């Protein structure tokens, strides 16, 4: 298995970040604190972009670097690219804040 | 270890670590603060993280000279301290007494007082980065760069990095009346920061940092001066303490810590000069000087 570099900073995260270009349909090992998860990456992931490390259900929080960065707008399969097409930002949404 | 941003192939500002030999390693974070805050949440040292990242990367490295480096941080606010060095006190006294130096001034008082002079210098929209022009005011005939060490702080006032700042100043406007200070200090492109942020944990003693300033006219050097942060009358953390006292500061605020390098009294910057400020462990902040066409108002 070819080694693709990724960053999985927090065990709370449900996405990992690519540290090199990852092509579609390869197995990638995600490591954090000695634990390892193998994810089958489904589509090409560019440097700095993120992919799901497990199934993320619609409306579930998306956590990157230990922080909620948004919510899934649809079910996101493990290994899928997580980006604006399936992630709704939670920051700066004044229309969703209840005062 | 230093942090920069450069313009990548997709025309975006890419955060990156910069090694001692100016090699660039992309960081998978949006900006300096998301990097620092992400590290803090996971109890990781930013410096160790970068070293690990560099060690595990096999991709070809780029060098700083091959990319366009841009402002390292969009500082929401830039504040500055004044009269923190003896040289600065002398220069301000020269302006305030029209060169006579015949009386005690408020500059003498503030130099010795417990409370430092801290003023609001710039906002993100007014602040420029490396190689961007710094502007001259059209209504001043005595303008100088002020080369300074900048502290990058977070919203609690903790120093998270060091950078270089150019606090462009109008000596005639400030000297005429201290109430004109905001006009002597703040206008479009009157503040420049960069080119890099030196990580706080990479610095054992910030007072050992050296500041060098060079001014070029038609590519000939017309002024050169240098100083050491240890000549500072006050302590850096004391300046931060007064900035955050009863105040609200934001992540990524920059506090400029005052100047110790003052060009000769007869010197004034001119259109097309170039100002270079170097702090050897941080880099060289270089900016061309421009006198833009003023917008006509009743003041001119």
Image: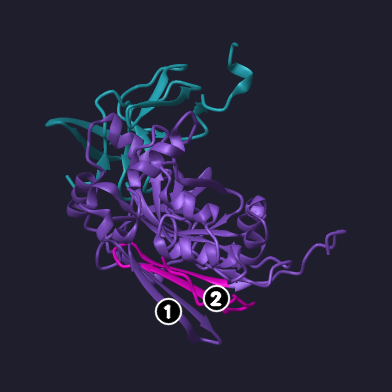
Chain colours: A cyan, B purple
Which percent across, then down, holds residue B261? 43, 69
Tag 1 secondary structure: strand
Question: Quick one: quadrant of the N terminus of chain B?
Answer: bottom left
Between B71 and B243, the one lying in front of the other is: B243
Viewed as shown, does residue B93 lie left or right of B280?
Answer: right
Q: Which mark is residue B265?
A: 2
Q: Which mark is residue B224?
A: 1
Q: Which residues are magenta?
A: B260-288
Picture quadrant where residue B251 is located: top left
Q: Mark 1 and mark 2 in contact (Cβ < 8 Å)?
A: no
Which percent across, then down, holds residue B210? 31, 66
Residue lying furthest left = A34
Which percent across, then down, holds residue A14? 32, 26
Tag 2 secondary structure: loop
Compared to A80, does B28 lie above or below?
A: below
Q: Kindly identify the residue that appears in the image at 41 percent across and 17 percent down.
A: A57
Question: Quick one: quadrant of the C terminus of chain B?
Answer: bottom right
Q: Kindly identify the residue that appears in the image at 76 percent across and 69 percent down.
A: B293
Mark 1 crowdedness (10 Å alpha carbons): few <14, some 14-19, many ≥20: some
**Quick check: is B300 in the magenta stretch?**
no
Viewed as shown, does residue A63 lie left or right of B221?
Answer: left
Viewed as shown, does residue A44 lie left or right of B218?
Answer: left
| Whether residue A45 is visible | no
């Amino acid at each position: 298995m070819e080694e693709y570099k990724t960053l999985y900073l927090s065990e709370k995260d449900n996405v990992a970040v690519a540290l090199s270009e990852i092509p579609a349909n390869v197995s990638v090992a995600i490591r954090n604190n000695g634990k390892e998860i193998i994810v089958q990456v489904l589509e090409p992931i560019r440097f700095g972009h993120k992919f799901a490390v497990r199934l993320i259900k619609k409306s579930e929080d998306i956590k990157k670097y230990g922080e909620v960065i948004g919510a899934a707008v649809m079910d996101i399969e493990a290994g899928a690219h997580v980006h604006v097409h399936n992630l709704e930002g939670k920051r700066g949404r004044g229309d969703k804040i209840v005062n | 270890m230093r942090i920069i941003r450069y313009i990548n192939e997709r025309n975006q500002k890419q955060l990156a670590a910069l090694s001692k030999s100016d090699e660039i390693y992309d960081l998978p974070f949006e900006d300096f603060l998301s990097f620092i805050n992400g590290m803090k949440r996971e109890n990781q040292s930013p410096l160790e993280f970068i070293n690990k990242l560099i060690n595990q990367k096999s991709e070809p490295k780029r060098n700083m000279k091959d990319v366009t480096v841009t402002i390292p941080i969009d500082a929401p606010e830039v504040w500055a301290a004044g009269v923190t060095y003896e040289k600065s006190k002398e220069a301000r006294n020269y302006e305030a007494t029209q060169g006579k130096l015949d009386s005690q001034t408020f500059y003498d008082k503030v130099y010795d007082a417990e409370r430092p002079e801290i003023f609001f210098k710039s906002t993100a929209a007014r602040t420029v980065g490396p190689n961007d022009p710094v502007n001259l005011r059209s209504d001043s005939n005595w303008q100088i760069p002020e080369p300074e060490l900048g502290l990058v702080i977070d919203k609690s006032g903790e120093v998270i990095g060091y950078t270089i700042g150019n606090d462009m100043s109008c000596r005639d406007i400030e000297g005429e009346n201290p109430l004109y200070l905001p006009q002597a200090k703040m206008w479009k492109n009157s503040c420049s920061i960069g080119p890099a942020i030196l990580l706080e944990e990479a610095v054992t003693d910030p007072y050992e940092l050296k500041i060098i300033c060079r001014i070029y006219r038609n590519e000939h050097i017309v002024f050169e001066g240098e100083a050491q942060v240890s000549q500072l009358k006050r302590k850096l953390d004391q300046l931060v303490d007064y900035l955050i006292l009863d105040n609200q500061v934001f992540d990524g605020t920059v506090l400029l810590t005052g100047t110790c390098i003052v060009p000769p009294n007869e010197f004034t910057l001119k259109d097309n000069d170039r100002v270079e400020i170097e702090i050897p462990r941080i880099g060289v902040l270089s900016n061309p000087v421009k006198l833009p066409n003023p917008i006509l108002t009743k003041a001119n």
